[in-house]
Amino acid sequence: MIFYHKFEVRWSDLDANKHLANSSYVQYCAQARMAFMTKEKMGVTQMSRWGIGPVILHERYSFFKEIYADQTVIVSVEIDGCSEDSSIYRFLHKFYTPDGMHCATAEATGVWIDMMLRKMTTPPDDVVEAMNKYKSPETEVLTREQFKKFPFHPHNIDPSELV
């Protein structure tokens, strides 16, 4: 299954080039995911009851066609990857105009965290069941080792170098 969420592009969503700003793509993906989670009965209120939250660790985007003010854009939500226990997930988002023109693709990889411990956790069965409905035969099984393959890793510096 694929979930779709519709947006009307507002003036405040644009950048200086008068097309959808990069920051708006990030916000649209996040809102589409939250709409998906709400539809699947795992919205903010339910996550608070469970004591869990979703955390995005890595995002990447490819842009194909500009999106302008006053256009309608439809953002898909698919489960592109998931660990066996659903603690790790990867959402795939595609941006379309109402006529089906594919304008951009985004990929967001994240984990569920225990909100008290602030550590990765396995989500409740309700979350696993909802996510499983949006998997396809091509959905990749993700592992913790794949986090090591992310292109960026933390490298602390001496604070005196910041002056």
Image (cartoon, rainbow, N blue to C red):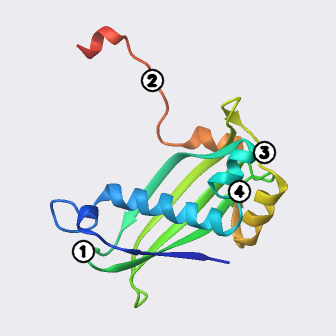
The residue closer to the viewer here, 126 or 1, is 126
Instruction: Using the numbered discs, state the Cα–Cα distance from disc 4 to disc 3 in whole angstroms.
Output: 12 Å
Distance from disc 2 to disc 4, alpha carbons, whole Å, reads 28 Å
Q: Earlier in the sequence, mark 3 or mark 1?
A: 1
Secondary element under disc 1, as helix, strand or loop, is: loop
Judge depth for marks 4 and 3 and give the one in front. 3
Q: Amino acid at mark 2?
A: His
Mark pair 3, 1: CA separation: 40 Å
Residue at the spot 29% in from the left edge and 74% down from the top edge = 67
Mark nearer the N terminus (2 vs 4):
4
Whole-number angstrom distance, CA of label 1 to CA of label 4 = 35 Å
**Residue 122: which disc?**
3
Q: Earlier in the sequence, mark 1 or mark 4?
A: 1
Residue linked to disc 1: 69
Label 1 sits on what residue type?
Ala
Residue 8 picture location, percent across and down? 36, 75
Given the image, on which type of amino acid does mark 4 rest?
Answer: Cys
Most foreground residue, 40 or 129 = 40
Q: Earlier in the sequence, mark 1 or mark 2?
A: 1
Q: Residues within 10 Å of mark 3 (few under 14, many from 20)?
A: some
Screen quadrant of the C terminus:
top left
